[in-house]
Image: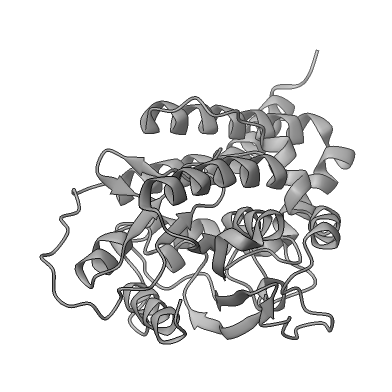
Amino acid sequence: MSKPWVKWLIGGVLVLALAPWAVMYLAAELTLMGSPNTPPHIDDEAKTKYPIVFAHGVMGFGYIGKQSYWRDIPELLRAHGAEVYVTQESAFNSSDLRGAQLMDQVREILQKTGAKKVNLIGHSHGSQSVRYVAGTHPEWVASVTAVSGPTMGSEVADWLDGLTHTNPKLADTLLDFGNALGGLINWRAHTSLPIDAREAMKSLTLGGAMAFNQRFPAGVPEEPCGEGSHVVEGVRYYSWSSVGQFYHPLNMADYLMTFSSKAFTREQANDGLVGRCASHLGQVIRDDYPMNHFQAVNQFSGLVGPDVNPLALYLDHVRRLKDAGL
């Protein structure tokens, strides 16, 4: 029979491994505090030719109640004249499945609005969803913007994938917990989309990202840390990202990103989940904003560092799209 200290050691390891997931869920609940109110119409400086369509990343959702994954960002853009749609994909699943889910929603948006095209903006794994749609139906898409997107994968996914070989029981426990979290997100978001944390992990490894890039190469840099083609098949490609993990002591995601950043060996400059160079796609607007991965979408509860305003970044970018005739 195992000695008591062995049981305590195993239990401690599991608690430490699962704690980040629990922190993430609690932080996600905090980001939903307060119902957003769309400010009255201010002006038309964000009124683009084509609608703006958002695609969330892993552990994400469209709306829970009145609050979206993109905390306060859609409301700000609408106040400045933009037509904005927030989509819902699986919280965890493969890039292809999530891309197909987004494609169905884009088709519906085009039918509903009568628009010829849309401007797609994807955060994190959502950047692969928007690339999937643009690569499959470029005639539907005016622009693709990747925000903190794992174009070259995430070293955190590589770490977890390695764990499936070195400690499969612990890896299975983590992935099962991820599936449970995805089910909880489904319940809170009133959806029943398929959840598969293992497929999400595979898609986000370096190998998974490289396989995706071979099928959807538009905008992918040919040189390490370079820029990709700015325009492919009439679609403009943009990206921006950030570096650093800890910027606000009251934002629990900062603690999680500090923890997850320990998985990085190739890129020390990272946002906690994605490396600076790994995020490059198309025209790189900037890759070193002082934010972590979740602050890039104004989470959680809008608690970010003092030197950046994520809301302003989106407004500036939509102005950029408008100026480009998109």
* 283 versus 127 height, above or below: below
> Vertically, is 151 above or below 280?
above
Q: How many marks?
A: 0
Residue sitting at x 84%, y 61%: 210
Task: Between residue 109 and residue 205, name the one nearer to us.
Answer: 109
> The N terminus appears in which quarter of the rendering?
top right
Task: Out of 323 and 94, give the one closest to the viewer.
Answer: 323
Point out residue 79 in the picture as x, y percentages from the top left corner.
20, 68
Q: Which residue is drawn at 39% across and 72% down?
A: 49
Would you say residue 302 is visible in this rendering? no
Relative image position of residue 309 (x, y in whole percent): 33, 78
The answer to whether residue 190 shows anywhere in this view is yes
Instruction: Give the color scheme: rainbow, by chain, secondary structure or one colour.
Output: one colour
In the rendered structure, the answer to whether residue 53 lies left or right of residue 199 reads left
Q: Which residue is at 77% across, 61% downward? A: 216
Q: Using residue 37 as the reference point, say whether residue 186 is left or right of it.
A: right
Residue 66 pos. (x, y %): 24, 43
Residue at the limit of the structure toward the left, as seen here: 40
For this view, does 174 lie left or right of residue 266? Answer: left
Instruction: Give the x, y percent position of residue 159.
Output: 77, 53
Identify the image quadrant of residue 52: bottom left
Against 292, residue 288 (above or below) is below
Whether 256 is drawn above or below 276: the answer is above
Of residues 229 and 202, which is closer to you in this image?
229
Q: Given the current orientation, which residue lies at the most extreme right position?
A: 165
Question: Residue at the location (30% across, 73% down)?
Answer: 47
